[in-house]
Image (tube, rainbow, N blue to C red):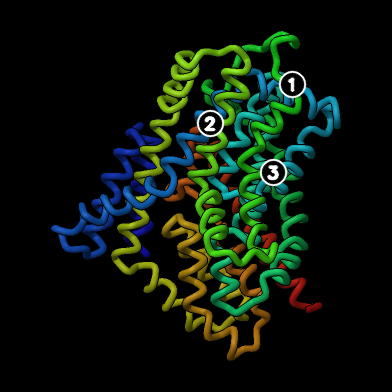
Amino acid sequence: MLVILFCIVLLILLVSWAKLNPFLAFLLVSITAGLMLGIPINKVTASVQKGIGEILGSLLIIICLGAMLGKLVAASGAAQKIAEVLVNAVGQKYIQWALVAAGFIIGIPLFYGIGFVLMVPLIFSLVYKYKLPAVWIGLPMIASLSVTHGFLPPHPSPSALVALFHANMATTFVYGLCIAIPTIILAGPVFASFLKKIPSEPLATFRAEEMPADKLPSGFISFFTALLPVMLLMLTAFFPYLGVTNEKALKVMAFLGDPSIVMLIALIVATYTLGIKQGRSMSVLGVNYVDAVKDISLILLIIAGSGAFKEVLTTSGVSNEIANSLKSFNMPPLVLGWVIAAIIRVSLGSATVAGLTAAGIVSSLVVSEHVNPNLMVLSIGAGSLAFSHVNDSGFWLFKEYFNLSIKDTFKSWSVMESLVSVIGLGGVLILNLFV
């Protein structure tokens, strides 16, 4: 624990005080942590490389294609059109709540990373057009995505926990909805009302000059293209429940439902609907795509660095040591599951790793203590979202996209994640009194 604390403090100092590039800071801290935690000196760099490869392997295609789609949605005027339609429908006064609802609906079928890069252009278009505080309007939608990621199946971690505890996915989903809605309201719009003065100048890649109304794509084309990834993922998510048993059809839908393929299809469609159909040449579109990747290159490196740090801590076995030391604590199983997941989350940064590691530790308690398995899924899911900081790729994704200082990212993103975690646990304990 002392080694982890030292490395986290060192990382914060290197980035905030020494002004070192975050990617280089992550590399230095990862190597330092590996050596201090006893990983053989000839295997430290291999662990770093494995961590970088694993996290980029799962996120590189999604983030790059998402950035290209976002750039096109902004540059074509589609984001401007969507913003106008939303504001006209609910009024500028309630636009924040409209985004919260959109984030919640989209977040159910959509992986967090995809939802983030998909919805950021919409958030920024409203920020620029109506001169709204970026964090105030953006954080509630991000809270919706985060809650659905940690609480609700079919997201990877909750789905895996349902299987591990032999819970009922439908029941867990219903309980999760009961907890998720008040959690989002309190950690989203209510908390964000205190953040209106946080200065934020979001990434320019998603900022497009306001276009005249006659040059904008239609509302249907704008919404259809921007939400196509959501529709494709929802289709593939519900396909198994349609009673189809043909093996080839199931394999095809599994292929089409892969997030990378979904984003690729969405970008191809957008290239036509928001590009060629609007009279933009492929050379112009190519420049837009190159610019989009350039703008997120540092974000990719930072995420890679966080992956290296996580892998070093995992390889050293420190997560298992922490969990085993907490297993002997005398506390209610639902609270114990939350505490173990929360501490691993703070130590390693990965919500998925924290959730699955904690589940392995407390799985025997679910049977021996007659704990409701559906509530244990939600308790561990809430714990896995606890205090997100510099070792979490989501922290850096939010910081860099919204162009915030480290301090302001802690005040907004980290506190929001902590509120989600604590309120989620409170909801679980309240439900436990009635079910």
| Mark 2 or mark 3: whose residue is earlier in sequence | 3
Give the x, y percent position of residue 391.
42, 50
Pick whichever, 71 or 310, lies toward us.
71
Which residue was labeled with disc 3? 103
| Crowd tier of the residue under label 1, counting other residues whose Cα lies within 10 Å: few below 14, some 14–19, many 20 or above | some
> Disc 2 and disc 1: Cα gap in Å?
18 Å
Secondary structure of residue under mark 3? helix
> Quadrant location of the N terminus?
bottom left
Q: Which amino acid does label 2 sit on?
A: Ile
Q: Farthest residue to the bottom: give it.
A: 368
- Residue 69 vertical placement versus 370 (above, below): above
> Disc 1 and disc 3: Cα gap in Å?
22 Å
| Crowd tier of the residue under label 2, counting other residues whose Cα lies within 10 Å: few below 14, some 14–19, many 20 or above | few
Secondary structure of residue under mark 2? helix
Give the x, y percent position of residue 300.
40, 37
Which residue was labeled with disc 1? 218
> Visible in this render: residue 306?
no
Give the x, y percent position of residue 327.
48, 80
Left or right of residue 106: residue 111: left
Q: Farthest residue to the left: give it.
A: 42
Residue at 75 percent across and 11 percent down: it is 213
